[in-house]
């Protein structure tokens, strides 16, 4: 397995589990910041180009955890060498998707909360937050669906030895 990640021409050593966990945390933090920026700029009619550029940046950051192949299947962040690694990958998908449908419940609750509270709230900032919250939670559920198996694999893999 490769022990370094090339990002924008820079080699990042990911041999230790701690570094890989920090990398996953930083990737999710970047996705969160970009999603907030997207919701702020995209829903404003004056800057749709900036909102579209932020969506492209979100897709770029998400693909750093693994993309899709030409058949539409998920690509692992490394090549599968034997049946043991295939079993680990399948188990990571099982763990990721076992309760994934529960990640849709906050969006459903936010939509119900929006319909109940929107008529009584007079603050424009709070109204705007209530209107955009269900969509933001759906985007978060989609990001989890797309990236969680790869994140589980990166976080659970033991420390790697550098290639000779």
Image (cartoon, rainbow, N blue to C red):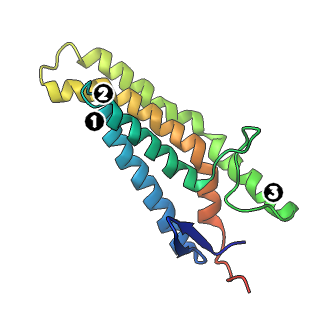
The residue depicted at 32 percent of the width and 22 percent of the height is 113
Question: Split into 4 quadrants, where in the image is the N terminus?
Answer: bottom right
The residue depicted at 30 percent of the width and 27 percent of the height is 43
Residue under pointer 3:
87
Residue 17 image point, x, y percent: 58, 73
Q: Are marks 1 and 2 in contact (CB under 8 Å)?
A: yes
Is residue 138 shown left or right of residue 37?
right
Q: Nearer the viewer, mark 2 or mark 3?
A: 2
Q: Earlier in the sequence, mark 2 or mark 3?
A: 2
Residue 164 image point, x, y percent: 74, 87
Tag of residue 95? none
Quarter location, residue 64:
bottom right
Residue under pointer 2:
43
Residue 124 image point, x, y percent: 15, 24
Q: Residue furthest bottom?
A: 164
Q: Circle 2 sits in a helix, a strand or a loop, which is it?
A: loop
Residue under pointer 1:
40
Spatial distance from mark 2 to mark 3, Cα to Cα?
43 Å
Q: Residue furthest top?
A: 119
Q: Circle 3 sits in a helix, a strand or a loop, which is it?
A: helix
């Amino acid at each position: 397995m490769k022990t370094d990640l090339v990002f924008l021409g820079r080699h990042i050593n990911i041999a230790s589990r701690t570094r890989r966990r920090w990398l996953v945390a930083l990737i999710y933090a970047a996705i969160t910041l970009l999603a907030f920026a997207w919701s702020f700029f995209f829903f404003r009619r004056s800057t749709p180009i900036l909102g579209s550029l932020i969506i492209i940046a979100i897709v770029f950051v998400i693909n750093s955890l693994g993309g899709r192949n030409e058949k539409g299947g998920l690509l692992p962040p490394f090549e599968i060498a034997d049946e043991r690694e295939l079993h680990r990958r399948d188990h990571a998908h099982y763990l990721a998707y076992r309760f994934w449908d529960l990640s849709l419940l906050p969006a459903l609750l936010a939509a119900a909360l929006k319909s109940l509270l929107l008529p009584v709230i007079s603050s424009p900032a709070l109204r705007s937050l209530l209107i955009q919250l269900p969509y933001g939670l759906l985007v978060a559920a989609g990001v989890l669906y797309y990236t969680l198996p790869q994140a589980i694999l990166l976080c659970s893999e033991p420390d790697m030895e550098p290639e000779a």
